[in-house]
């Protein structure tokens, strides 16, 4: 049986082994004690002459990347960073992110990823919860002003900000033109503020001589998610967790060619999917990471033609955008493999993109609590559209009863997807009660997704337990939006549900009941929410209604509104 460990595993309890791809061993053996730092150092030594990064035409070799990381690690140490300190990264996709990420880890610190889309309030809440003491950002609007405003709050633990100049990452002429022509995009760095350092000062330090010893069990990243309740939680991902996931990806990616691939990184590094697939696993295989600061079609098209990337990870929205903008076979012929994650992949998008590009596209599934990739369709075995595929090596999966999570269901039965593996988090940061809700007594992670496993281990997701909206691969939690709406003095009741969105997959829709005598409009509410929600969280639809549906016991009910929105979408399509 392909991929089945000889005489050690019962295929009745592990049905996916019946369909496992040839040459892939499900009983993954991980290098003992390997950390992300040791993985990085090995890659630098092995691929030193290879190109490591391309950012809009400026390129770094692996040797240059290794030197920059070693210098930045020493620079952080000289700023007082000690092992276990939390360092925040609030950066768009740039070489600065990769350098700062591995420099922080080499200094023994814990990386805390912040979305550059966050408003000041969201930055402050995450900084306070994580105890972030140093933030690394870039001199762009509105990122830098928001970080500096956040630092002025009395309860903000951030004591120092390191600012990179965006133009420094560009090729010489492009950097000069950016400073001349994009002045409105550049945020001035306040002079004379001792709390602010320049990123160049980190790189001016000598390479770190004696990095602190790092255990694989140490936390490497606090990756924030809303979990099942919508309250932001820091997911504790250890070096062992993240390293296991990139090794699982490495074993699964049977068509990869170490030292020869070019990884297109347009999905944002602060997102856990890009962190593992487009950055960590890319470095482990010695790929050149082709970095784009954001999605913009003309920039993406030019980069495809100039760099000819071979691996294209993305969310379904990104692949659909390529189709909608008229990408041609010549544009995409360089791409050998696409990895779709973050949201369900429509079968039509998969079929059209594969046909156009002539590549293999696999749909996967993961969640922050699992570093994140858990399932994927195979590259060289049956690739079943509409499913999330098979468990990756080392991951044990079960479907459990929705009412009794201790009861394992059989083939074809619908229940909660639960997993166990070396990539699963150690828990939520300072939240033992929340941790106990998702990690069962027998070591399984409850995903909050409802699925069915067939006789060969392929899983199809059919529902969602957690109150979550997937917007272009980003998690949006209705509770966050509802709490923001309730802060308006004239809102009596508010509820937020997912609405179908042809481009984004789903989008938030807010329904608001005003207090007696109040006059609310969608425009007024949008203006009120502007500094409380980021662009992804902002409801696409806001409706003000005299009453909202409620259950028999008086609680707000969402199912009637969700059904109404589905019927509207069907009517629009018809």
Image (cartoon, rainbow, N blue to C red):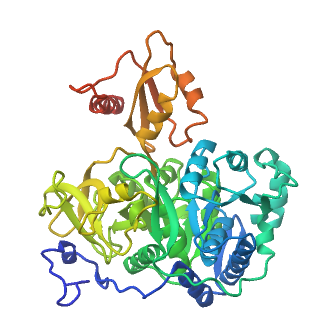
399 vs 60, nearest the viewer: 399
Question: Residue at horizontal 24%, vertical 66%?
Answer: 441
Q: Is residue 19 left or right of residue 437?
A: left
Quarter occupied by residue 409: bottom left
Q: Position of residue 566 (x, y in %)?
A: 31, 33
Considering every residue shown, the one lying at the far front of the view is: 154
Considering every residue shown, the one lying at the far right of the view is: 192
Instruction: Give the total number of marks visible in the rendering.
Output: 0
Q: Position of residue 316 (x, y in %)?
A: 43, 53
Quarter occupied by residue 533: top right
278 up-or-down from 508: above or below: below
108 vs 276, nearest the viewer: 108
Question: Residue at horizontal 38%, vertical 59%?
Answer: 432
Q: Position of residue 547 (x, y in %)?
A: 35, 17
Tell me if residue 170 can be seen: no
Q: Position of residue 560 (x, y in %)?
A: 27, 28
């Amino acid at each position: 049986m392909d991929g089945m460990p000889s005489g050690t595993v019962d295929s009745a309890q592990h049905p996916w082994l019946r369909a496992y791809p040839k040459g892939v061993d499900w009983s993954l053996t991980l290098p003992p004690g390997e950390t992300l730092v040791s993985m990085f150092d090995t890659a630098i030594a092995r691929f030193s002459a290879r190109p490591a990064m391309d950012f809009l035409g400026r390129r770094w070799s692996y040797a240059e990347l290794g030197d920059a990381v070693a210098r930045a690690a020493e620079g952080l140490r000289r700023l007082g960073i000690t092992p276990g300190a939390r360092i925040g990264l609030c950066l768009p996709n740039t070489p600065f992110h990769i350098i700062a990420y591995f420099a922080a880890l080499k200094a023994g610190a814990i990386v805390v990823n912040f979305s550059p889309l966050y408003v000041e309030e969201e930055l402050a809440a995450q900084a306070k919860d994580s105890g972030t003491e140093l933030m690394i950002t870039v001199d762009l609007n509105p990122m830098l002003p928001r970080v500096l405003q956040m630092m002025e709050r009395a309860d903000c633990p951030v004591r120092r900000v390191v600012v990179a100049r965006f133009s420094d990452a560009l090729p010489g002429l492009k950097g000069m033109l950016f400073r001349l022509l994009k002045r409105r995009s550049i945020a001035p760095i306040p002079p004379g503020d001792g709390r602010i350092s320049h990123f160049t000062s980190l790189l001016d330090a000598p390479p770190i001589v004696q990095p602190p010893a790092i255990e694989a069990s140490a936390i490497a990243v606090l990756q924030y998610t809303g979990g099942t309740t919508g309250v932001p939680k820091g997911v504790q991902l250890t070096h062992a967790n993240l390293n296991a996931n990139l090794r699982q990806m490495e074993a699964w990616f049977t068509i990869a060619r170490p030292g020869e691939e070019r990884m297109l990184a347009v999905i944002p590094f602060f997102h856990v999917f890009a962190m593992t697939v487009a950055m960590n696993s890319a470095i482990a295989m010695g790929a050149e990471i082709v970095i784009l600061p954001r999605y913009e079609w003309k920039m993406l098209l030019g980069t495809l033609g100039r760099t000819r990337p071979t691996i294209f990870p993305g969310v379904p929205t990104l692949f659909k955008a390529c189709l909608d903008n008229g990408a041609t076979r010549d544009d995409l012929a360089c791409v050998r493999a696409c990895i779709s994650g973050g949201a369900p992949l429509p079968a039509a998008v998969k079929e059209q993109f594969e046909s156009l590009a002539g590549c293999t596209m696999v749909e996967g599934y993961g969640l922050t609590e699992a570093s994140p990739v858990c399932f994927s369709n195979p590259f060289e075995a049956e690739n079943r559209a509409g499913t999330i595929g098979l468990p990756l090596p080392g991951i044990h999966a079960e479907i459990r009863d929705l009412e009794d999570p201790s009861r394992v269901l059989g083939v074809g039965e619908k229940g909660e997807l639960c997993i166990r593996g070396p990539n699963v988090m150690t828990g939520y940061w300072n939240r033992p009660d929340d941790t106990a809700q998702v990690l069962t007594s027998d070591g399984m992670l409850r995903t909050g997704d409802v699925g069915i496993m067939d006789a060969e281990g392929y899983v199809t997701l059919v529902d969602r337990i957690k109150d979550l909206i997937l917007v272009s691969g980003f998690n949006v939690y209705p509770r966050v939006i509802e709490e923001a709406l309730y802060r308006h003095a004239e809102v009596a009741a508010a509820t937020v549900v997912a609405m179908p969105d042809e481009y984004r997959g789903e989008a938030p829709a807010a329904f608001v009941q005003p207090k007696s005598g109040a006059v609310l409009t969608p425009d007024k509410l949008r203006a009120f929410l502007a500094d409380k929600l980021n662009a992804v969280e902002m409801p696409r639809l806001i409706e003000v209604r005299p009453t909202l549906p409620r259950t028999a016991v008086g609680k707000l009910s969402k199912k009637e509104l969700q059904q109404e929105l589905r019927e509207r979408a069907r009517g629009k399509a018809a």
